[in-house]
Each structure stands twice: as structure tokens, then as C-alpha cells.
Image: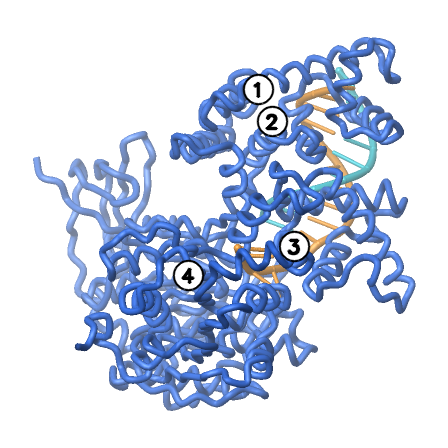
Chain colours: A blue, B orange, C cyan
Amino acid sequence: MPSPLLDGLNDAQREAVTVPDGPVLVLAGPGSGKTRVLTHRIAWLIQEHGVPPWRIVAVTFTNKAAREMRQRVERLLGSDLRGLKLGTFHATCAYILRREADFLPLTRDYVILNTADQRALMKEVVINDLNLDVKRHRPERFLARISEAKNEMITPETYPVRSYEDETVKRAYEYYQTRLLALNAVDFDDLLLHVAHLFEQNPDVLARYQHSAEHVLIDEFQDTNSVQYRLVRLLSGLHRNLFCVGDEDQSIYRWRGADYRNVLRLREDYPDLRVILLEQNYRSTQVILDAAQAVISKNPHRTPKNLFTELGEGPQIVLYEAFNEEEEARFVIDTIAGLVASGETNPGDCAVMYRTNAQSRVLEEAFVRAGLPYRLVGAVRFYNRREIRDLIAYLRLIHNPDDDLSLQRVINTPPRGIGKKTLDTLFTWARAEGLTLYRALERLSRDPEAGPFSGRARNALIRFRQLLDGWRGVRDRLPTGELLRLVLDETGYQDYLRDGTGQGDERWDNVMELLNVASAEENQALADFLAGVSLVSDVDDLPEQSNAPMLMTLHAAKGLEFDVVFIVGLEEGILPHQRSLDDPEQMAEERRLMYVGMTRARRYLMLTHTFRRSVWGSESLNERSRFIDDIPPHLILSAGNIQSAYRRMTTWGGGSTPPRVRQEEPSSDQPSRRFKAGQRVLHPRFGEGIVVESRLSGSDEEVSVVFNGGDIRRLMASLANLTPLDG
DNA sequence: TTAGTATTAATTTTT
DNA sequence: TTAATACTAA
């Protein structure tokens, strides 16, 4: 009897879901339902083969993907999946490390350093251990080289020295690792590396995990790096039930060590590998697919795929040349408003994608000016904000007092009389005594003779230590949220932040947000909270409910889909990025990035570039991206040139419009006044307000509204989603 | 020691 | 344009 799990799947998808045990590689094009195949495969194993959930290991690349996959499997099976190991590589490794800490040079209280921590630590190494000038020898450079080495599983001892610079990197690497161990810390790369070493050096530990990993499933296989590949091989070594899903053309993390040649390695390492191709696309129209294919096919060394869809031709791709980035943003908003007004789509089904985060600002401003809501993915990451990092540092210090990095961050935040001088003295003294900073403080409080400190400095230091010990004394009794509240109280952090400026209030709001996160899970241990904080990115925390266009980098767009996709800034030097221009490998990756962006679109794909753009204040004239010229002209509807761009600048709402897209836009209709002074209105973002003025401007109605809270805003009636309120 | 000002440097993508 | 850092005055 056919299982309902196979309902609605095509032949290739069915084959993948029901494939017999053994190594499998599913090569899937964009929109071919690979996530679906993966989830159905998991459900299939559990339901039809009776595999217990806890003997399945599934790895995704983001926490969000993991969460969604779990929900989908649950929905399919309607049963609980306790024990199903479903998470990212990093989260899985963090978990294993905590459990097996006895085998490692770490305790289970180890901390995970984020990028900022790494930079701080490396800076310290450069200054104190290497005695070099940080200006000439940038910490980021060392870290990049070290990360490269770690991804190749090269240790400091085996680091190849071919130049003087290599020699310096090697020494930096040595010191860096020593300092990490002293801090009881690991960086992102170490997380994977420690587990690989653990497995390789402790056959019995490996055997334990191998035994329970009856089935291993890997999503986004093209984005694995060598260490991850090694882990996958080790873990699946006993049962050899390895199920990998990926698409070479969507490999966009080479800079992070991802090596799409793992796909080739897999074929070599498993001669009995079964390869399944998923070529039917269920997302995009044929026009979009053809254009995307044309772009990606210029890349060398790829397996040609023949993507097809049954969704029909669809509208042409719109190409728009704007005068500058502001005008570009206006085009985006204008077009979205038009499509929404004509009932083609919802705001929430539109997305704007760009190469670099810096490009988001102009777009955001345009949205704000139009009074339209938007959702920003990523950008200034919540956990990278100063105030959040401060508080996390406090928590980490309470958790692991030997975390010198955190200690240095907070010892004088808010200011408590421990300035640069005192900290320097403490640092050199602790170094000389071979102590971490906290242990040095301990000795200071115990022995009044110890250390080269003035009375005032000594008192301040001892007071800080008492503060810290107070929290350490209660940390096991208090939930994380309470602990954080205590820290806020006893440090006077609120007064320190809220300096009366709007920015201060905003920062305090962020703190409250963190407090919410920390209090959310009642009985979460501090350790788990901190591990979670280190491993989440904001990509995971999309505000799902609100129906607003999304702004994101092309990288963040992977795995998502939208009715309408804008790719903005299609200029040489931006996409492809400046730094990729002279390296064919990197250029190929830019091309894949473009491909990923294009294939996110279901119906409408809008490509824009500008005549001139300001980069760091200064203006530059950019040629349009080579990727545009790779699209067959008959698929494109050109909707702008410099002349019309100029005209659009002076007559807002008028100008040349892409016919297919904007025909039904209300602003081109005969305008009539919908609002009058005194009327109450509702705005999705600003809430309730009262109209103070309304006048016709050009072909649109400009409304000034006082919102509750006193803000006066000028809104374009055709863009702002204003609802008149009766009564 | 701190707070404020001046200068300079750096800008890809993220688990 | 912003963020980090250096410098200066109190």
C-alpha cells in the first residue's frame, strides 16, 4: 500500500525519499523541493522503516532551517520526535563537546568566542605576545589565515612556512591557541575541530556516536568545509547511511571554507554512491529559470542541469536603471506599492536583495519616508550591539571567571574608577604571576601586600571582585533572567545607558529585549543560554507575523522564496564585488550568488542598477553588472534610462513606468482626495493618528498626520497603508 | 580618570 | 558615513 508520505511527490522525489540504505547524493536545483524531500525522508525512515528518532542525525546550516524541518516532520508524523538530533553542525558539536569535556583540554564550562571576541584576543596577542604594531599587522588578517588553516586541519606545529609572513602567522597561531586554552574558550572553527580530534583519538567515543547515528542526513551539502566533511564521514562510518542534499550552483560560502568539491570527494569516497537528480522546479516561471540558467551556465566546471517548470512563461524580467541609489530605492517602493494595489501580491511576499549590508540603509530610509513597514534581516546584529555585548560579557564572566576578554570589557563598564592605567598594571602583574585577571583579583583581596597598586586602585578592584563574587554565589539558584536583572540593578547599568538621548533609550530597549530572551525559558541553565547566544544569528529571528517586504543580503536569501524579488545594485564592483574582479574562483562565486538571488523569485524578478552611486561619501559612476548582459535580451523588459531617471526625480509618481508591472498603479489614476483634516486614521506601523493636512501633489495625495506620541509624518496616500477610522 | 573632541581608518558575504 | 581610536582638557 502506498504511503501517504509519498502523496504529491514526483518520481524523482519519490525515488529520493524511498531510496534503500547506503550512501546517497541528491543533486537538486533551486525550488525543486529538496527540503521537502529531506523532511519526507526522515518521516519515511521513522514511519516505514521503524527507525527510532534518536538514531537519526540531521544537519542543517541555520538554526532556522533546523527548527522549520523539525516542525515539518512533526506535522507529517503527528507524533513526538524526542531524541531526533536535528541542528546545525556548530550546535551539534557544541553539545558533544560539553558532554565529552573529560576527553578534552576544556571543562564543560567552556565559552564560544564570537568574531568580536576573536578580534580582541588576537589584538592582545599581536601587542603583547608578538610585540608588533597592530596597525601594520592587522588582527583580522591573522584570524583569516588561521581560520583557513583550521579548515584544512593544519595545526600551529604543522603550519607551512614559506615566507616571513607565514612565520609570523605561525607564531600568532601558536599564541592564539595557547590563550584560547587558558581562557577555556573555543572559536567557531575549534568547535568542529575539537570534535574531529575527539573522534579520531578516542575510538570508543567515536564508536558510541557512530552506533547511534544509524542515519545521517545533510542539508546544503555544497556548503560543507573539509572539517565538516570529515565529521560526516566519521559519524556515518559504521552504518554508511549517508543522505546528502545539495546544489553546486548554490555554493556561496567558499570564503568561509566551504568546498563544493566535497561533492566530488563524496563520489570518490563512496563508489556505491547513488546519485539522484531533482530538476523540476516548482517555484519560478520559465522566464526566470531561463534567465537564471543563462547566468549560471557561464561558470566552468559544473554539472549542467536542465531545469524546467510547469508554471508557464510568466512576465518578463524588469530591468531598471536608476539615476542614483535613492532613486533606485524609490523605484523599489513604487513598484511594490503598484503590485500590491493591483492585487498581484502582498507586501510580505516581496523581498529586496543586495550584495552588502551597507546597501540597506538607503532602502530603509526610503521605506521610512514613505511610511511603509519593512522587515530587515541581519544587518546590525542584535548580539553585536555594544550594550548587549556588555551584558553578555557579565554573564559569561559569572559563568567562567577566567574569561579575561569579558572581564576586560566590563571591569569599568559602567565606569567605576578602574581606568586604563589601573587595568594595564593589573594585566602586566597578572601576566607576570601567570594568573588570569580574575585570579589576580582574588589574590589582591586575600593579600593586602600583593600587587603594585595604589590604595584607591586597589579598593576599586576589590570592590569589583566582591560584586562579581556576589553574583557567582547565587548563579546556580537564580534563573538566567533574574541573574541578569540583578546585574543590571547592582551595576546601575540603566542610568549609565539612559543618558537622556534617544539613542540611550533605544539601547535600553535592547537591554529589555535581551532580558525577555533570557527570561523566556524558565529553567534554562546559564551555560545553555550562553551557548545559544553564541550560535544564533538574527537570520533565525525573523518577525514572521508582519506582512511587510523583507530586506536582506543575497546570502541571507538562500532557502527563501518570494512572489516578487528585487536585486538592487547590479553594478560592476558591487555585484560582482570589487574584491572578486581579479580572481576567477571568486567571480564564479559572485555568479552563483546572483543565481541564488534570481531563483528566489516566483513570478516577478526586478533587476536594478544605478548610473551613479555614492560610496563612502564620494560619488562614483558604475558600469552595469556583467550578469545583466548574460541574460538573453528577449527575457528582459527595460524600464528606465538615464533621461527618464532624471525626469522621475523631478516628477515623483510620474515618469516612465514599466508597463506590465505598473499599469494598474493607483497613482497614475485620476487622483482624488481621500483624507481631510481632523479625520482619524490607522497606520500599520505608526498606529492611530489624526490628519492635520491633506493636499494633492502631482498625481498623488500628500497627507500629514499626527500620530499618538506626537510624531508628525508626511505620507503619500498611494504608498502608506492608511485606513480611515469612523467615529 | 573621565568625558569630550579630533582624527583616522575602513568597509563582503556569517556559523 | 560610521566606527574605532587618539588626544586633550578638566
Q: Secondary structure at mark 3?
A: helix
Location of mark 4 (residue): A56
- Judge depth for marks 1 and 3 and give the one in front: 3
Q: Which mark is residue A398?
A: 2
Quadrant of residue A600 within the rendered picture? bottom left
Using the image, tell me which numbered label, if any, was put on residue A498: none
Q: How far, Cα to Cα, is label 2 from label 3?
A: 28 Å
Number of the front mark, 2 or 4: 4
Query: Along the polypeptide, which appears first: circle 1 or circle 3?
Result: 3
Q: To which residue does mark 1 refer? A: A471
| Mark 3 neighbour density, 10 Å: few (under 14) some (14–19) many (20 or more) | some
Given residues A111 and A710, the one toward you in this image is A111
Residue at position x 58%, y 82% in the image? A264
Contact, mark 2 vs mark 1 (Cβ under 8 Å):
yes
Mark 1–mark 3 contact, CB under 8 Å?
no
Upstream in sequence: badge 2 or badge 1: 2
Please, which chain is the residue tagged with disc 4 on?
A
Q: What distance separates the C-alpha of mark 4 from that of mark 1?
A: 40 Å
Q: Of the residues shown, which amino acid type is indicated by label 3?
A: Leu
Question: What's the residue type where badge 1 is placed?
Answer: Trp
